[in-house]
Amino acid sequence: MNKLKQFALAAAVLAAFASVAAATASATELYTEGGMVAPGTTITSSAEGTTTLHPPIGSIECKASTVAGKTSTTGGASETVKGNIETLTFSECNATVTVLKAGSLEIHTSGETVNGNGTLTSSGAEVTVLFLGFHCIFSTNNTDIGTVTGSQATEGNATLDITATIPRTGGSSGAFCGTTAQWTGAYGVTAPSALGVDVLCTRKEGTKGDFSTSKLCAETDKNDYDPGKKEWKRFPV
């Protein structure tokens, strides 16, 4: 085989490997104890404590907030899990907070190592605030807003931990609102009761699971797999 053919073959092998690696890294699916989350599945969450927006005019604090929406994609090797937000509310606030558009969310696997967690991106959400006479509008556009901690890590309901920089896109108070505001808070997923990104490991009673520890449950090489004789169960197996 001449050098040109050898080079062409090597390039083809590398390209194929790169495409497989990229597909593996970008794979995102959601799992409940019923299996893979299908399009049209409703996911609901409520704030665990105060959510806060931090523009220059002062901290906007809301003691209650809810987020709910339906998935529109299944996810997989070449796509993430997406969904439109149908409910976005902020209440018991120290300012007037009005949701103009709820937008959409996208869930990404957190990395090449499957650990049941992920990251969140928001697009198309728009919120106006009126605080101490200042009027500001903040919007998301493919904005990283935080992380998903799956049920494997929490040993209960999944959580959405929000740490985001939200751009200001309008408002009559202009520069007084700043160019961005930090949004912080935490939401507990209320439905489904168990949720994981790419993998879901849950503790079972007695010997109704397949793995002895959560770490072994999360691994993909099926170490210590013993159907029906251990306390942790994985979806998918």
Image (cartoon, rainbow, N blue to C red):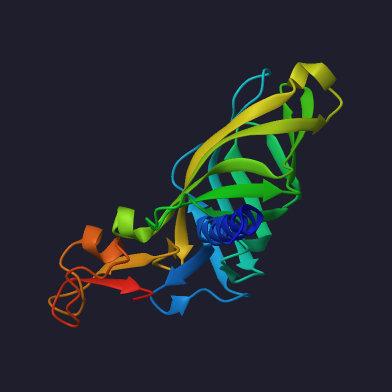
Q: Nearer the viewer, residue 14 or 27?
A: 14
Q: Which residue is drawn at 81% across and 17% down?
A: 175
Q: Nearer the viewer, residue 27 or 4?
A: 4
Horizontal side of residue 84 vs 94, given as left or right:
right
Horizontal side of residue 71 vs 237, given as left or right:
right
29 is higher (above) or lower (below) than 7: below
Q: Residue at x 64, y 57 (%)?
A: 8
- Residue farthest to the bottom? 228
- Residue farthest to the front? 2
Total label count?
0
Q: Residue at x 22, y 62 (%)?
A: 216
Q: Nearer the viewer, residue 171 or 107?
A: 107
168 is higher (above) or lower (below) than 231: above
Tell me if I can see residue 52 in this picture: no
x, y percent for residue 144: 61, 41
The C terminus sits in image quarter: bottom left
73 is higher (above) or lower (below) than 187: below
Tell me if I can see residue 233 in this picture: yes
The N terminus sits in image quarter: bottom right
x, y percent for residue 102: 72, 53
x, y percent for residue 230: 15, 74
Q: Which residue is drawn at 13% across and 79% down?
A: 229
Snapshot quadrant of residue 213: bottom left
Horizontal side of residue 142 vs 43, given as left or right:
right
x, y percent for residue 195: 42, 64
